Image: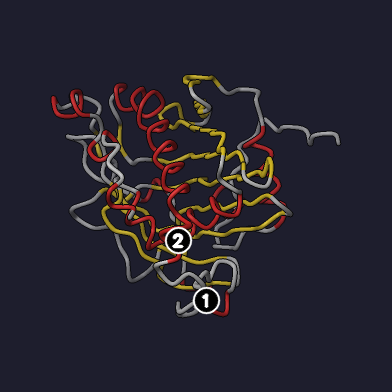
Amino acid sequence: MEKPAVSTEPQGPRPVLGRESVQVPDDQDFRSFRSECEAEVGWNLTYSKAGVSVWVQAVEMDRALHKIKCRMECRDVPAETLYDVLHDIEYRKKWDSNVIETFDIARLTVNADVGYYSWRCPKPLKNRDVITLRSWLPMGTDYIIMNYSVKHPKYPPRKDLVRAVSIQTGYLIQSTGPKSCVITYLAQVDPKGSLPKWVVNKSSQFLAPKAMKKMYKACVKYPEWKQKHQPHFKPWLHPEQSPLPSLALSELSVQHADSLENIDESAVAESRDERVGGAGGEGSDDDTSLT
């Protein structure tokens, strides 16, 4: 099958890059996201080891913005298990050591919702948070989950966190067999600030590979964990199970990066703890919380 031509234009969901109103991504958006996940032109390989690869790409329209793409081969993990792990918010609180707080806010359609996520940044940077519209689509034996930032009237920026902007973030999960898959993580996020070079380098050389490996370990342990925690509750597969209130799209608005405060952290030096022990929880391989 001939691959679709790879455009040199940004391939983010159209609601962010070309519309003023919030819309749920359609089939064309999912196809564009998949094409960018599979694209090779314009990406610089920065890490490749033990089945994990990382690429970065400077965005022409703003050199301060970078895209990052990570790919990992997952042996002994079916595509559907990885898809469940990425959706299961209660399990994420167990394995994602960077998370400060995460919760779903409301349901938009059977395959789209709005949620909140805050995370720890490498010390001494300020921690970040986002409000995103997330949508997902099974495609045969493959799956896509992607999101972009929106504004919700009840969740304005907080004083103790920097509100970041997800321009395009998501996962492409491709089945390679009954018990194996490949996951590609693609992110274009505006951190709302001038970050020091060590942060960009550390993200691609250490943080991203470490996070992917931790995700893999979480996937291996998920079936056993899920058997003890509402094993049949999977609203991402069975939308009738969703306890979330419905929300009209008109209640949301597009989160433009230029409407948020920029934080200049370009001169911030890496803390000694970060250099010695890694990025907070990411530096640890302790899996005791997954039981």
Residue 240 lies left or right of residue 191; in this view the side is right
Viewport quadrant of the C terminus: bottom left
Q: What element carries label 2?
A: loop
Residue 48: x and y in percent read: 50, 20
Q: Looking at the image, is mark 1 or mark 2 earlier in the sequence?
A: 2
Residue 173 horizontal side relative to residue 287, left or right:
right
Q: Residues within 10 Å of mark 2 (few under 14, many from 20)?
A: some
77 lies above or below 36: below
Name which residue type carries label 1: Ala
- Residue where numbered disc 2 is placed: 88
Type of residue at label 2? Asp
- Helix, strand, or loop for circle 1? loop
Between 87 and 80, the one lying in front of the other is: 80
Vertical side of 205 occupied by 164: above or below:
below
Figure check: 34 above or below 83? above
Question: Farthest residue in the right direction?
Answer: 1
Q: Which residue is drawn at 64% across and 58% down?
A: 137
Q: Can you give x and y, in whole percent of width and height, for residue 170 in the image?
A: 53, 47
Tell whether label 2 touches label 1 (CB within 8 Å): no
Residue furthest left as drawn: 272
Q: Mark 1 points at which residue?
A: 248
- Which percent across, then down, holds residue 98? 30, 45
